[in-house]
Image (tube, coloured by chain):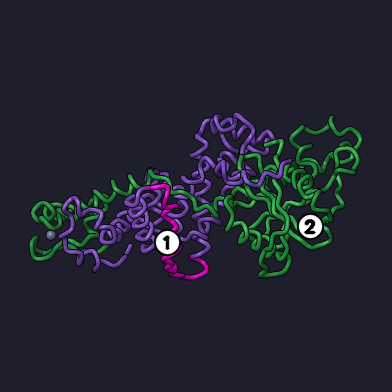
Chain colours: A green, B purple
């Protein structure tokens, strides 16, 4: 703070905006504040700046009360991150009890942990969340298979795509985005041209012997998922070509 | 399972990002959702996030100016809140608690950015327009005003911006802001005053309806920031 902005004579020089702003905030030493106040009273221009600064504070407060909608892509990503945190937490709780779980699956863990017990590996990668689910249809009690690698590409026929996708999604509380960031990106591009464009499922798979990607998008109702099986997403910069479509209805949504 | 492809799109998109939730959560208050989260419920924190993300986004984008930075800060903040939800004191408002975590995450990023050296915020017009939110959500003048403020805030220094966002926009008291920013109350006041002086010429057109347009902009433009 210097005196440079203060006039030696009231009307020779206007106050600078900093000085007026300081005056409003009571930051000026008493003699300076007195002179500044006198100038503002006598000078319409500086009075106007004074009023404008007071008004600005009110305008900022008004604007500050308004929310700003989070951009959709950022919101989706945040949702996926929170889902992966949740799944991670559930599976961490589950790890302590794996042995008991096999012996007495219903006694040791709350239901919600059992629901997530099929989920083994969770990692947030790039834009997507990788949630690896174990196919526990043939497993023992509680369906735990801790040895399933995260990058597994399950094989199936087109007829099995629907039931499998249903199982993957019902084991998760949110989107299941699996595969490399390239593969997820390819699915995103594919999804962008579809009616419901939020990805619910990306799962690399061998379908009828072809390396393919199962992509799930919102269907006509909240529990419906529209599935497309596409080729072309497994390499980098690929373009999805769909060869099989179906819709599944999730029972737990 | 059905194969009824013709139905797709007919019913419109699901209500929100992750589809339908078990009934009842949406009507619970914040405290209850957080309590259930601490008790192990896997869904309720996500509902809290959805409920408050636009508020928290406003804080982050105003404080940081850059959407990528704001998104990263919010992600850090929400994960931190997720993990230490049991430290929440039940007598406070959940939003106050969340808000504070978000503010701190933003300030952490600013400090790290300052350590990396003075990097002017890059201009990105396309991204800037997007910051005003989806066009369908708000009237044009609301979006325009929002953008004006965001753009103006980006042009002042980050110390002044943080102080102004906390005090003028978010309504923290000078003392609270001083505690959050780790500086003296007088410093907060000074940063606010100087920040307003910087913003005034940038936002003067807001005030044209109130007849403030013919004040010489020269005095403001000449006053270069000294604290
Ligand atoms: Zn004057």
Residue in the picture at 68% in, 55% down: A124
The answer to whether residue B84 is above or below residue A240 is above
Residue that numbered label 1 is attached to: B128
Element on which disc 2 rests: strand
The subunit letter for the residue under badge 2 reads A
Residue in the picture at 54% in, 33% down: B30
Q: Mark 1 packing: few (<14 Cα in 10 Å), some, or many (20+)?
A: some
Cα distance in 3D space between marks 1 and 2:
39 Å
Q: Which mark is residue A205?
A: 2
Left or right of A152? Residue B123 is: left
Where residue A185 appears, as percent x and y from the top left, is: 64, 62
Q: Which residues are magenta?
A: B114-138
- Quadrant in which the N terminus of chain A appears: bottom left
| Quarter holding residue A194 | bottom right
Residue in the picture at 68% in, 39% down: B42
Is residue A89 visible to the viewer in this orientation of the structure? no
Element on which disc 1 rests: helix
Where residue B21 appears, as percent x and y from the top left, is: 62, 36
């Amino acid at each position: 703070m210097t005196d440079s902005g203060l006039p030696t004579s009231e009307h020779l020089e206007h106050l600078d905006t900093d000085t007026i702003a300081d005056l409003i905030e009571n930051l000026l030493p008493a003699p300076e504040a007195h002179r500044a106040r006198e100038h503002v009273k006598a000078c319409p221009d500086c009075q106007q700046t004074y009023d404008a600064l007071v008004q600005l504070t009110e305008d900022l407060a008004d604007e500050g009360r308004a929310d700003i909608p989070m951009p959709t892509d950022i919101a989706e990503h945040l949702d996926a991150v929170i889902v992966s945190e949740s799944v991670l937490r559930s599976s961490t709780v589950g790890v302590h009890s794996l042995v008991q779980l096999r012996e007495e699956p219903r006694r040791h863990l709350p239901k919600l942990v059992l629901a997530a017990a099929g989920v083994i590996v969770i990692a947030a990668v790039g834009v997507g969340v990788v949630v690896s689910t174990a196919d526990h249809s043939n497993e023992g009690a509680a369906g735990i298979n801790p040895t399933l690698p995260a990058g597994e590409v399950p094989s199936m026929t087109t007829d099995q795509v629907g039931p499998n996708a249903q199982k993957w999604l019902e084991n998760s509380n949110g989107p299941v985005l699996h595969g490399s960031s390239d593969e997820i990106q390819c699915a995103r591009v594919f999804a962008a041209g579809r009616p419901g464009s939020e990805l619910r499922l990306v799962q690399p798979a061998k379908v009828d012997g072809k390396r393919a990607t199962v992509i799930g998008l919102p269907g006509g109702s909240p529990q419906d998922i529209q599935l497309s099986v596409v080729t072309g997403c497994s390499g980098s910069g690929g373009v999805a070509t769909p060869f099989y479509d179906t819709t599944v209805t999730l029972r737990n949504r | 399972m059905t194969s009824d492809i013709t139905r797709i799109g007919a019913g419109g998109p699901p209500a929100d990002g992750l589809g339908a939730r078990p009934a009842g959560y949406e009507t619970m208050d914040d405290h209850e959702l957080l309590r259930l989260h601490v008790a192990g419920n896997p869904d309720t924190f996500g509902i809290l996030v959805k409920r408050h993300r636009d508020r928290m986004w406003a804080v982050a984008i105003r404080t940081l100016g850059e959407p990528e930075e704001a998104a990263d800060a919010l992600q850090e903040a929400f994960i931190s809140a997720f993990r230490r939800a049991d430290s929440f004191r039940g007598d406070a408002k959940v939003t106050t608690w969340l808000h504070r975590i978000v503010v701190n995450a933003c300030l952490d990023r600013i400090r790290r950015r300052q350590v990396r050296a003075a990097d002017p915020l890059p201009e990105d017009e396309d991204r800037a327009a997007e910051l005003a939110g989806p066009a369908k959500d708000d009237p044009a003048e609301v979006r325009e005003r929002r953008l004006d403020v965001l753009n103006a805030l980006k042009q002042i220094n980050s110390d002044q911006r943080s102080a102004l966002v906390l005090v003028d926009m978010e309504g923290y008291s000078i003392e609270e802001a001083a505690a959050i920013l780790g500086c003296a109350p007088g410093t907060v006041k000074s940063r606010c005053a100087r920040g307003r002086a910087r913003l005034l010429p940038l936002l003067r057109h807001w005030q044209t309806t109130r007849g403030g347009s013919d004040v010489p902009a020269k005095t403001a433009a000449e006053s270069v920031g000294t604290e």
